[in-house]
Amino acid sequence: MKAQLELYGSRFCHLCDQAKEVLKSAGILAVHIDISDDDVLVEKYGMRIPVLRRMDHDTELGWPFDNATVLRFLL
């Protein structure tokens, strides 16, 4: 079973764009969650986006990350 992933970020976050590119280049799919319109998510993630969250283990990987780091996170 593949891990379900969510990538928390916002529309105008250049680091979030970079994180999306890392995931794309690694062939990894993640649901993109824009925190901008959710006060709870802004409070939780606002100062540390992008954050990749693995739903099956409820673990998070904060930026910066690269292909190798993401692949280790998924093991």
Image (cartoon, rainbow, N blue to C red):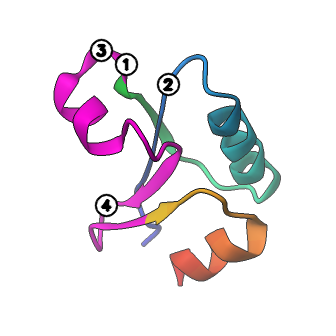
Residue 46: numbered disc? none
Circles 1 and 2, Cβ within 8 Å, touching? The answer is yes
Residue 36: numbered disc? 1
Look at mark 4 in the image and give the residue it sits on.
55
Q: Nearer the viewer, residue 72 or 2?
A: 72
First in sequence: mark 4 vs mark 3:
3
- Bounds of the magenta segment: 36-60
Circles 1 and 4, Cβ within 8 Å, touching? The answer is no
Q: CA distance from mark 1 to mark 2?
A: 6 Å
Relative to 16, 34 lies left or right: left
Give the mark toward the camera: 4 or 3: 3
Q: Secondary structure at mark 4?
A: loop
Residue 37: numbered disc? 3
Q: Amino acid at mark 1?
A: Ser
Q: CA distance from mark 1 to mark 3?
A: 4 Å
Q: Amino acid at mark 3?
A: Asp
